[in-house]
């Protein structure tokens, strides 16, 4: 119960912090992403549309009038939906059994393009260029569907035909974030790992912060925002290969 409450408080603070940052810095247009969310987010805002991932469906709201959101569309999918990540004109939804790819050029009516299927596990996803990076976490927290945990690289150059091109074992991966040649992967109690993806298809472990119990990250203007056990941290990664702690807000419940 303690861990759940801690996570809830952090998630609430996380949403408010990112929302405020985005309000100051993001250019908002009907088809553009507003703000930046973590890979384990269950909701996202793109222009005037709010997307909510429910256990078995994607719910779309019109928020052109923020004080009066209007439900516009519901897309029924299989049970086990978990996360959503908007990228350019697409939505990537992580589920227990795979990754759904939607065309979002019509924001109120996203269209399913393809589904990349994997073993049953927890499944956040981030995207950069022609590649999606997916962490698969097995164990009791993921309904015991999988015994192995991994980091997968999926080629999405053809959005209708996603292909697994690389996989490597992980310990206990949670959320992840990508920026340029760096990929950040949270490993819960096993720390925060930074990979060099100069070669996008072959992530190479560059550094491990073993004392950072991390659950999700957002890379934003060369500052890495990290949620973890007990608080919220900010790291500078302006110098590749060197993580500099900028601040920490402790949360104890």
Image: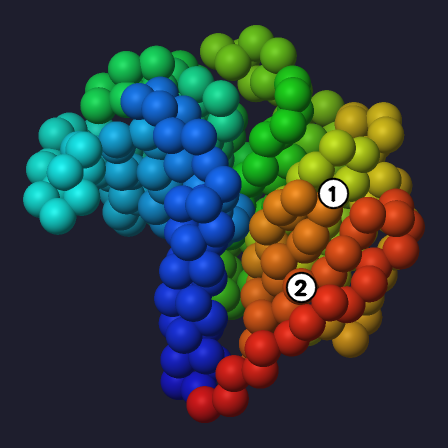
The image quadrant where one finds the N terminus is: bottom left
Residue 180 picture quarter: top right
Residue 166 picture quarter: top right
Q: Residues within 10 Å of mark 1 (few under 14, many from 20)?
A: many
- Residue 237 appears anywhere in the view: yes
First in sequence: mark 2 or mark 1? 1
Residue farthest front in this picture: 24
Question: Which residue is located at x 49 percent, y 65 percent?
Answer: 141
Which numbered mark, 2 or 1, is in the foreground of this view? 2
Q: Which mark is residue 234?
A: 2
* Residue 89 location (% of width, % of height): 43, 18
* Residue 85 location (% of width, % of height): 47, 37
- The secondary element bearing badge 2 is classed as strand
Question: Which residue is located at x 38 percent, y 66 percent?
Answer: 12
- Give whichever of 90, 24 is nearer the camera: 24
- Residue 147 appears anywhere in the view: no
- The secondary element bearing badge 1 is classed as strand
Work out whether 95 lies above or below 18. above
* Residue 179 location (% of width, % of height): 70, 37
Q: Which mark is residue 183?
A: 1
Question: Which residue is located at x 73 percent, y 71 percent?
Answer: 212
- Give whichever of 198, 224 is nearer the camera: 224
Q: From the viewer's perspective, is 189 left or right of 108? A: right
Work out whether 129 lies above or below 5. above
């Amino acid at each position: 119960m303690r861990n759940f409450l801690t996570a809830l408080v952090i998630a609430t603070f996380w949403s408010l912090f990112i929302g405020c940052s985005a309000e100051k810095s993001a250019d908002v247009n009907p088809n553009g992403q507003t703000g930046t969310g973590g890979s384990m987010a269950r909701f996202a805002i793109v222009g005037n549309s709010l997307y909510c991932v429910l256990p078995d469906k994607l719910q779309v709201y019109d928020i052109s009038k923020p004080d009066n959101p209007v439900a516009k569309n519901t897309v029924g999918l299989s049970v086990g939906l978990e996360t959503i990540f908007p990228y350019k004109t697409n939505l990537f939804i992580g589920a227990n059994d795979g990754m759904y790819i939607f065309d979002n050029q019509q924001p109120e009516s996203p269209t399913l393009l393809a589904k990349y299927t994997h073993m049953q596990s927890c499944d956040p996803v981030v995207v950069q260029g022609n590649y999606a990076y997916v962490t698969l976490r097995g164990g009791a927290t993921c309904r015991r569907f999988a015994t192995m945990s991994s980091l997968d690289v999926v080629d999405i150059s053809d959005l209708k035909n996603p292909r697994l091109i690389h996989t490597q074992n992980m310990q206990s991966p949670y959320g992840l974030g990508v920026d340029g040649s760096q990929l950040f992967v949270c490993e819960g109690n096993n720390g925060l790992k930074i990979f060099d993806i100069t070669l996008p298809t072959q992530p190479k472990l560059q550094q491990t912060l073993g004392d950072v119990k991390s659950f999700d990250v957002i890379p934003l203007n060369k500052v890495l925002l990290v949620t973890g056990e007990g608080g919220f941290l900010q790291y500078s990664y302006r110098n590749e290969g060197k993580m500099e702690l900028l601040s920490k807000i402790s949360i104890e419940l």
